[in-house]
Image (cartoon, rainbow, N blue to C red):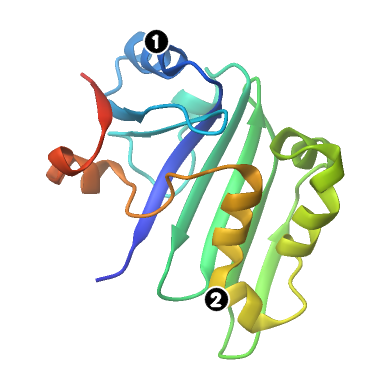
Amino acid sequence: MSDFSVAYHLKTDQISDVVDLLSSLNIKGYVFQPTNGWVTFVTELDEFEPHDLISKNVSGTLLFLVRTNDFLCWNFEVFLDSESHGRYAIQASDELHAEIVNTLSDQALSLLVAQSQIDDLTRILNPVFYNAALDKGDLDFAELVGLENIEWISYFQIDCNVDDYEVVSVQ
């Protein structure tokens, strides 16, 4: 079975920021405890694109991440105060090559990592070797940015196995 994850990550140390957002929008979801300055959450609006209802009503830095572990395919979009600052996507085009779409602004990179880490982030997002991207490009990205909740994370996955996760339910 493939690990396929779809989740939002809000840059905050306060779980209440996400609980209040979802409650005010009347959206069901599951919210993780803060880790490394990020609160991960999933919603019943479980789609492969960030939902406007969430992205247009959030304050602060929001990262929407989609990834799978069985083939090279992951992407994310960065928002600041409801405005998109670009997206990144990498997908295998064949067994030796990947297609990359990168519309991230310089500001988007600085929203994700410290200035001293921008070169490292740029290297991860522009892999020289296909195998490096395939093996763990998404994991390297998550580690550098500080995301821990990226595997087996989606609304459906958690809703069906809620006892396996330490999350706050927003109804």
Residue at image mark 1: 20
Picture layout, residue 7 above or below residue 70? above
Q: Is residue 101 left or right of residue 57?
A: right
Picture layout, residue 56 above or below residue 131? above
Point out the residue furthest to the bottom here. Answer: 95
Q: Position of residue 126 (x, y in %)?
A: 76, 66
Local SS, label 1: helix
Q: Position of residue 137 (x, y in %)?
A: 61, 66
Q: Position of residue 41 (x, y in %)?
A: 39, 32
**Mark 2 and 1 residues: CB-CB less than 8 Å, in contact?**
no
**Amino acid at circle 1:** Asp
Residue at image mark 2: 135
Q: Is residue 23 left or right of residue 91?
A: left
Front-lying residue, 36 or 47: 36
Local SS, label 2: helix
Cα distance, mark 2 to mark 1? 37 Å
Q: Is residue 7 left or right of residue 109?
A: left
Give the quarter of the image for residue 115. top right
Rendered residue at 64%/77% (across/down): 132
Q: Which mark is residue 160?
A: none
Sequence-first disc among 2 and 1: 1
- Position of the C terminus, as image quadrant, is top left
Q: Position of residue 78 (x, y in %)?
A: 64, 38
**Amino acid at circle 2:** Asp
- Position of the N terminus, as image quadrant, is bottom left
Q: Nearer the viewer, mark 2 or mark 1?
A: 2
User: How many residues crowd around disc 1 within 10 Å: few (fewer than 14), some, or many (20 or more)?
Assistant: few
